[in-house]
Amino acid sequence: MPVTTSTGEYHETEEDFYRNQVFGPGYNKETDTYENPKFFGIRHGDTEFNEKDPETGLNKVHGWTQQPLNEKGIEQSHKAAEDFKDKDITQIVASDLPRAKQTANIIGKYLDVPVVTNPALRTWDMGDLDGKDTQEAHDMVKKHALESCQE
């Protein structure tokens, strides 16, 4: 079934629409190739979890925590946008976690390109370790490993 977006973009099929959302402009489905393909990978900007605790010197495990960028992370994202201004970026694909989405949106706005988020790009789900400082996380894993060996 044909799909027309709210911006008037026409796609022969729903599959073509989703393929364009995932692969972006320049993708040729017949040859499964891109015209002048380029891929740039960057990490999200810093969050408060990247900052070392002044007392312990440790930072925290991120995982799927819903951490937004801190001031430094916002500055890093603007710097990355400036660095990418002459790279002919046509689309940005990012995890749907706030820190990645916020980084992507800052860069996308600066470059005037669409941002697509995809939960498949999330980092590992760290479960109970999320938000723990690295020493506490280490101790929890060690305790669990020892208990598992004794069973």
Image (cartoon, helix red, strand yellow):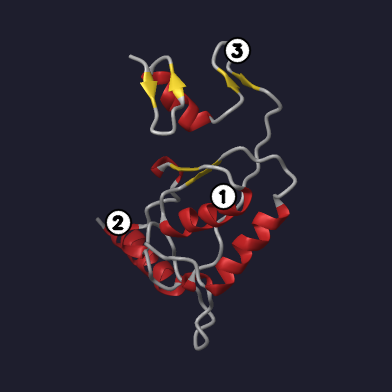
Mark 3 element type: loop
Amino acid residing under circle 2:
Ser
- Tell which circle, 3 or 1, labels the residue nearer the N-terminal end: 3
Which of the two marks, 2 or 3, is nearer to us in this view? 3
Amino acid residing under circle 3:
Thr
Q: What quarter of the picture does the C terminus occupy?
A: bottom left
Q: What quarter of the picture does the N terminus occupy?
A: top left
- Which numbered circle lies on residue 108? 1
Question: Mark 2 and 1 residues: CB-CB less than 8 Å, in contact?
Answer: no
Q: Residue furthest bottom?
A: 55
Residue identifier under label 2: 148
Q: Residue at x 62, y 46 (%)?
A: 41
Mark 2 element type: helix
Residue identifier under label 3: 31
Rendered image quadrant of residue 46: bottom right
Is 100 in front, or is 58? Answer: 100
Relative to 134, say whether 144 is above or below.
above
